[in-house]
Image (cartoon, rainbow, N blue to C red):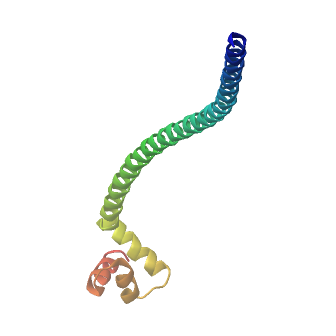
Amino acid sequence: MNETIFIILIIGCSVLELLLLGGALIFYIRLKRSQVLMNTLQENQQTLLARIEMNARLEREIVATFAQRQAELRELDSKLEQRATDLRRLMEQAEGIARSPQFLREIIINGRKKGLSPRQIARNAGLSVDEVELILAQNP
């Protein structure tokens, strides 16, 4: 009877060892699956980080280009303002010259040389016919 108990005990321990070995095998398989899943997640994370880095680099380039364009626009605006000021000054000079008596006299004399009538000369010069005739009378 002692022997039977001993054999039952040995069989029980063997079954228990087989159950433990089966549990360890199942745990190992699940651990391998988890490791594969973790590797996949790490690869996806690396890909995501690379894309985020690329997007950040592109954003920095866009911001730098935008800042450069803004500076160029400011420079062009100042040049445009300077040119507008120059043109206003030139227009004022041209108006001053166009209204000077010597210039008007030359327009009237040239108009007579071309054979224009006093009325046509007056219209071209922006004067009255009487003024044109007076100037023509002074310069025969």
Point out the image quarter for the N terminus. top right
Q: Nearer the viewer, residue 53 or 112?
A: 53
Quadrant of the snapshot with the C terminus: bottom left
User: From the viewer's perspective, is 134 left or right of 86?
Assistant: left
Classify residue 94 by image quadrant: bottom left
Number of marks in picture: 0
Residue drawn at 40 percent across, 87 percent down: 120
Percent x, y of residue 30: 65, 32
Q: Is residue 26 above or below residue 106?
A: above
Q: Residue 9: image x %, image y %? A: 67, 16
Query: Residue at the spot x=31%, y=77% of the render?
Result: 135
Q: Is residue 21 left or right of residue 49?
A: right
Residue 67 is left or right of residue 20, and the answer is left
Of 42 and 51, the residue lying toward us: 42
Residue 126 appears in which quarter of the rendering?
Answer: bottom left
Vertical position of residue 26 compared to residue 3: above or below: below
* Image point (67%, 25%), residue name: 19
Up the image or down, 54 lies above or below 9; here it is below
* Image position of 71 with respect to 89: above or below: above
Front in this rendered view, residue 5 or 138: 5
**From the viewer's perspective, is 104 left or right of 21?**
left
Q: Position of residue 133 (x, y in %)?
A: 31, 84
Residue 54's image quarter?
top right
Q: Position of residue 93 (x, y in %)?
A: 33, 58
Q: 126 or 23, which lies in front? A: 23
